[in-house]
Amino acid sequence: METLMIDKKICAVGLLFLGACTFAKKDNIVPAIVPQSQYTPQIRYIRPTNIIGEVEPIYMLPMKSAFLARVDTGATTSSIDVQNLKRFERDGERWVSFKLVNDSSGEEYFFEKPVVKRVKIKRTEQEEHRVKVMMDIKFGGQKMKTEFTLAERESFKYQALIGRNILTGRYIVDTSLTNTLK
């Protein structure tokens, strides 16, 4: 019977990094079975089951009519088309006022919001600076408060863009679908 010979130095290193050192027969190596400790937390990952399409409705609360939004998994933050964007200061803080106009329904609403921060948007042709605000929305039947960058998106087909800040952990996107949400 041939045994596995291990140098004392290698054994010491094994003890240091592996926590154990065994002398066993070459043909008789058995993996250790380690019972789960009562202190080991159970890791549970719940996959999102909501499958949405490339274009979905979003409500910018308190407005009553939905905006059609393009779902963009490449965008970090969601964005909305605004009109009459004005920056001002209130109590030493940066604020903005703007108007949202739903092109499909004609509904208009005037907002005043504190600026969360200014962000740099990199696009292939140029770089632009936008303001980011917190907006109350309803998307897929869920109400939430989330960040939106404000932009003049009149050159785009859709007034809103849904980014990863809304999608992550909630939705799976199937680009062959549209309008799956109510």
Image (tube, rainbow, N blue to C red):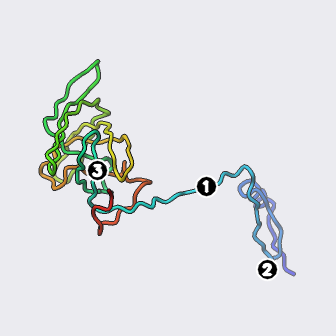
Q: Amino acid at mark 3?
A: Ile
Q: CA distance from mark 2 to mark 1?
A: 36 Å
Decide: is 89 above or below 126: above
**Which residue lies under the disc numbered 1?**
43
* Residue closest to the far front: 64
Q: Nearer the viewer, mark 2 or mark 1?
A: 1
Q: Secondary structure at mark 3?
A: strand
Secondary element at image label 2:
loop
Identify residue type, mark 1: Ile
23 or 39, which lies in front?
Answer: 39
At a point 36% along the width and 53% down the height, the residue shown is 140
Give the residue at x 79% y 77%. 26
Sequence-first disc among 3 and 1 = 1
Tell me if label 2 and label 1 are in contact, CB under 8 Å.
no
The residue to which callout 3 is attached is 58
Tell whether 147 sits left or right of 99.
right
- Viewport quadrant of the N terminus: bottom right
Which disc number belongs to residue 144? none
Q: How many marks?
A: 3
- Residue 181: horizontal and vertical position, in percent? 33, 58
Crowd rating for badge 2 (residues with CA inside 10 Å; few <14, some 14–19, many 20+): few
Using the rendered view, name the quadrant where residue 150 is placed.
top left
Q: Which residue is mark 2?
A: 27
Characterize the local packing of mark 1: few (<14), some (14-19) or many (20 or more) Cα atoms within 10 angstroms. few
Q: Kindly check if marks 3 and 1 are in contact, taking CB atoms under 8 A apart as contact.
A: no
> Quadrant of the image for the C terminus?
bottom left
Look at the picture and state if 139 lies above or below 176: above
Whichever of callouts 3 and 2 sits on the residue coming sooner in the sequence is 2
Q: In the image, what residue type sits under mark 2?
A: Asp
Closest to the observer, 58 or 127 = 58
